[in-house]
Image: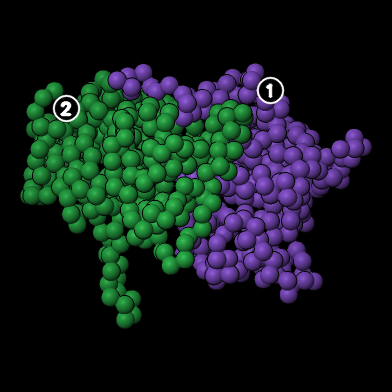
Chain colours: A purple, B green
Amino acid sequence: MNSTTPPLLQVNALSVSPAGVQGGARVVDAVSLQVQRGRILGIAGESGCGKTQLLLALLGLSPRGARVQGQVLWQGQALPAQGAARLRGDRIAMVFQDPMTALNPYLTIATQLCEVWHRHRPGARAQANSRALEMLQAVGIDQPSRRLKQYPHQLSGGMRQRVMLAMALMCEPDLLLADEPTTSLDVTVQAQILDLLLQLRERLGMALIVVTHDMGVLAQLADEVLVMESGRVVEHGSTSQVFAVPQALATQRLLEAARRLDISAAPAAGGGT
Amino acid sequence: MSGPLLLEARDLRVDYPLPARGLQRAVGITALQQVSLTLADNQSLAVVGESGSGKSTLARALLRLLPLAAGQVLLRGEDLAILTAAELRQRRRDLQMIFQDPYASLDPAMTVAEILSQPLRVFAPQLTAAQRLDRCAAALQDVGLLPEHLQRHAHQFSGGQAQRIGIARALIAEPAVLVCDEPVSALDLPIRLQVLQLLAAQRAQRGLALLFIAHDLAAVRYLCERTLVLFAGRIMEQGPTATLFAHPRHPYTRTLLAASLRADPQAAQAAAAQRRALAPVVAEPAGQSGVEGCPWAPRCNLAQAQCWQQPPVLRQLGEVQVACHRAGETV
């Protein structure tokens, strides 16, 4: 890529302090990162490390009253501190961890998918339905026209996660944020969704930020890995480098857990008797 | 140890009734069929499969939390189905369970002391209140928590700590078998490892038998000597975990292994390539519904005419038992 092209997303010293906390307590502390078009950045950390708060801050969705400092540049243009609303759902989309709570149980799949389109493409209302159908096909849902008329509770967990993904893809975003996109899923469905994310990157040239506690997810997906602990970035490098020579203790801990819990690892002492 | 086998299931079948719809008659779906297993003292057995495979149904059927449509569950040679409610309650001391969602399985209105006292009130009614409290404190320490946690409520703990309380509640009854239904799948990886280490240590120390239900093969590998693979309520393959993982005979077992996350970028790529190789190539033949044949056939890369027509029976192949028409062919 041309070196004068600004990165798709650039974050400079982003900090988030929750509402009502005195002093300098920060759940996200001076985080800087860049994502180039078509690249996949993995953000790893244990629960409470601030990785989800970072994603929410990028989208301008920090909890009410939280103080957000720092700079977010989208294709080189500064976004106002809370101003990603224009891009949200259009150029930047997000897939949440729990598809059951992120989908509205009262609305059909069609209504929820079309809502995204109506909001961002008000001039093209007529195409909404065919677009929704196309996206359900793209994420590998069978009988898509039947699914459009159904409600979230009528779908399996894996299918709901695919619907979330279809919803995020409605406007062909340049950047997809995925917060633990597969933790609630079966291994087989998890593998399908991860394979699908890679295919979509190939096909659409979409960039991706994936947040997870499982280094196994990043081993498969990420081009580069950023590790967070207590709101700070403690390690950042290419995936091969981070896996080969992890520097930070937090990274080593995450990798150790993933390696001990790999299908080729040795059983627990006393377990294999 | 000699004497009767700790736990044995023979040809279990569980049906879930579906309500009548309009003019349609009420029908049942079979959640489990022809499932047999044995668990000796001190052994560990994993039951793996995806959601809907019947693995939680199996756990519930073993504990007689569900009625059996057919088959028998024997605990030390005694048929659980013919016990009275009072007898069953005492026998259940030997069969304790740990649930998937630690918060949902702990009463939010109770303190930890009250939660841990419940099994003692049933199984050791002779204890005084002070003795009970001592036992509860000791049980907490066994799982790596502190006696001062006794007065707290479940919501004051992290997920990993809450699961430790669930384990303490199961262990305080001093069971012979611990039935764990996806005990770590809701936990972050580093915490998952800690809880599995705790289970391994407690098991070794107490000589517990373990029935471990999971969809995560890595946890199974870590904890269990034998593995049983379930799909659509039927056993696809079972045998020693090490053999099953090194030489999976059933295409479904291969699929599960290839879908497992790998802690290494190169291994992850190899697994992705293997998943592509395992993708089904044969479309369902016309006029076949797949219902009569092998339940895996619609997703199998090796399915042939026979697979759509008749269900394979479980047969011995080396160290494992496998239900696949094509297992043992040179593939």
Q: In this picture, is A127 found above or below B322?
A: below
Residue appearing at x 42%, y 56% in the figure? B305
Q: Secondary structure at mark 2?
A: helix
Disc 1 packing (10 Å; few <14; some 14–19; many ≥20): few
Task: Judge by depth and name the residue closer to the eye, A144 or B211.
Answer: A144
Q: In this picture, is A124 found above or below B4?
A: below
Residue A188: image location, x then y, percent: 49, 45
Mark 2–mark 1 distance (CA, rounded to whole Å): 55 Å
Residue appearing at x 60%, y 24% in the figure? A251
Task: Judge by depth and name the residue closer to the eye, B16 or A257.
Answer: B16
Chain that bears disc 2: B
The quadrant holding residue A5 is top right
Indicate the amino acid at tag 2.
Gln
Indicate the amino acid at tag 1.
Gln
- Say whether residue A143 is left or right of residue B305: right
The quadrant holding residue B142 is top left
| Residue that numbered label 1 is attached to | A241
- The quadrant of the picture occupied by the N terminus of chain A is top right
Residue B143 visible: no
- Say whether residue A174 is left or right of residue B183: right
Residue A139: image location, x then y, percent: 62, 55
Task: Judge by depth and name the residue closer to the eye, A101 or B246.
Answer: B246
Residue found at the far bottom of this picture: B23
Residue found at the far right of this picture: A4
Chain that bears disc 1: A
Q: Secondary structure at mark 1?
A: helix
Residue appearing at x 49%, y 47% in the figure? B301
The quadrant holding residue A16 is top right
| Residue that numbered label 2 is attached to | B131
